[in-house]
Image (cartoon, rainbow, N blue to C red):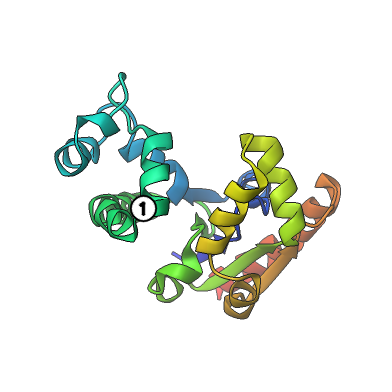
Amino acid sequence: MFAVGLTGGIGSGKSTVADLFAKRGVTIVDTDVIAHRVTAPHGSAMAAIASEFGASFVAANGSLDRARMRALVFSDENARKRLEAITHPLIRAETERERQQAQGPYVIVVVPLLVESGSWKTRVNRVLAVDCSIETQIARVMRRNAFTREQVLAIIGRQATREARLAAADDVIVNDGATLEELDVDVDQLHHTYVSLAAA
């Protein structure tokens, strides 16, 4: 099935854009949602995470202690790679399963780290980037997650640059102060383009 990879930096508005496509009957496969599922209480990654990192990284309800793990992987590159070695294969397998079950004219796969991962560009037919300024990202994430400016900048620093994302994109939606109505118009135009491309 024709697949569009939807990406963007933290706080760019990927979820909002994905929701607008979903309103048009497009199947959305969100790798972030899948990542949360495999690290939810007794999720498929949790036994391996407990074995690799210890029980202190498992919350009382059996899910990943996200705050503790975030602090570790931000300070220890090796720990980040060990975590990804556990979670990424599970996320990839689940993503492919959901893609195979997708209904509609095409599927959108939401991949925050699409540019960084390297391999994703070859697994989708087209890349759509949601773009906004870094200051907009910082303001949104501080408001949404109650993170400090320094915490948000640290996350942005680990992601691909804005320039790299735009260079990798076939299509771009600018979400810098756009209203929901304006975003809806942009999504509608792209939706018709993707339906035509999928049909061809």
Image height check: is 116 above or below 168? above
The quarter of the rendered structure image containing the C terminus is bottom right
Which is nearer the eye, 151 or 61? 151
In this view, the residue in front, 51 or 195, is 51
Query: Split into 4 quadrants, where in the image is the N terminus?
Result: bottom left
Q: Position of residue 37 (x, y in %)?
A: 36, 37
Q: Is residue 38 above or below residue 74?
A: above
Q: Residues within 10 Å of mark 1 (few under 14, many from 20)?
A: some
Question: Is residue 187 or residue 134 the one in the foreground?
Answer: 134
Q: Is residue 2 visible?
A: no
Residue 90 visible to the viewer: yes
Residue lying at 33% horizontally and 55% vertically, measured from the top left: 80
- Residue 62 relative to residue 184: left or right: left
Q: Left or right: where does residue 96 sit relative to residue 199?
A: left
List the residue tagged with mark 1: 95
Give the residue furthest to the top: 60
The kind of residue tagged 1 is Thr
Local SS, label 1: helix
Q: Position of residue 198 (x, y in %)?
A: 55, 69
Kindly identify the residue that appears in the image at 71 percent across and 60 percent down: 134
- Residue 21, above or below 124: above
